[in-house]
Image (spheres, rainbow, N blue to C red):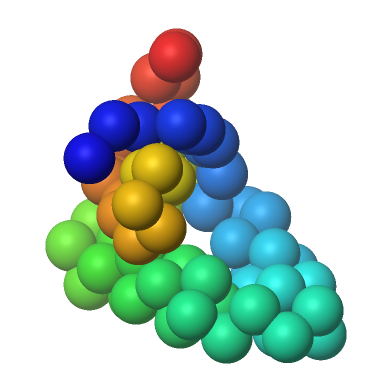
Amino acid sequence: MRVVAKEILDYEVLASEICNMAALGDTEYSLMLIAAKADIERTYGQQCANYSVLVSSFEDGPQGYMIVPHDYKL
């Protein structure tokens, strides 16, 4: 289970990325981003803009996410 790709999505772009992935038919990725957005909102409330989502893609297919500070660098 080796990571093959990582991507950081700022909170501000999550809504548009969810719509884009849904339009492309990638339902699984869209649902994961919806869950990540809900986690950020539930946990950080008014400070949502200070956080991003780190999406990791693994060689065996599944994807996972972590909530990271907005200034996090790969």
Q: Residue at (35%, 32%) from the top-left corner?
A: 3
Q: Residue at the far top: name it.
A: 73
Q: Residue at x 50, y 33 (%)?
A: 5
Decide which of 45, 9 is in the foreground and name it.
9
- From the viewer's perspective, is 61 left or right of 19? left
Judge left or right: residue 6 versus residue 69.
right
| Side of 2 relative to 12 (left or right) | left
User: Residue at coordinates 60% horizontally, 62% vertically from top-left?
Assistant: 14
Q: Quadrant of the C terminus?
A: top left
Q: Is residue 4 above or below residue 9?
A: above
Q: Is residue 49 above or below residue 30?
A: above
Question: Residue 71 occupies which quadrant of the picture?
Answer: top left
Is residue 50 or residue 27 the one in the foreground? 27
Residue 45 seen in the current view? no
**Quick one: quadrant of the N terminus?**
top left
Of residues 2 and 14, the one nearer the viewer is 2
Residue 1 position (above or below residue 17): above
Residue 4 placement (x, y as % from top left)? 46, 31
Q: How many marks?
A: 0
Quarter of the rendering containing residue 27: bottom right
Kindly give the residue lying farthest to the left in the view shown.
Answer: 43
Q: Position of residue 40 (x, y in %)?
A: 31, 61
Viewer can see residue 32: yes
The percent position of residue 28, horizontal first and vertical second, equals: 48, 80
Q: Is residue 34 above or below residue 58?
A: below
Picture coordinates of residue 43, whole percent (x, y): 18, 62
Q: Residue at x 73, y 86 (%)?
A: 25
Which one is nearer the viewer's eye here, 21 or 51? 21
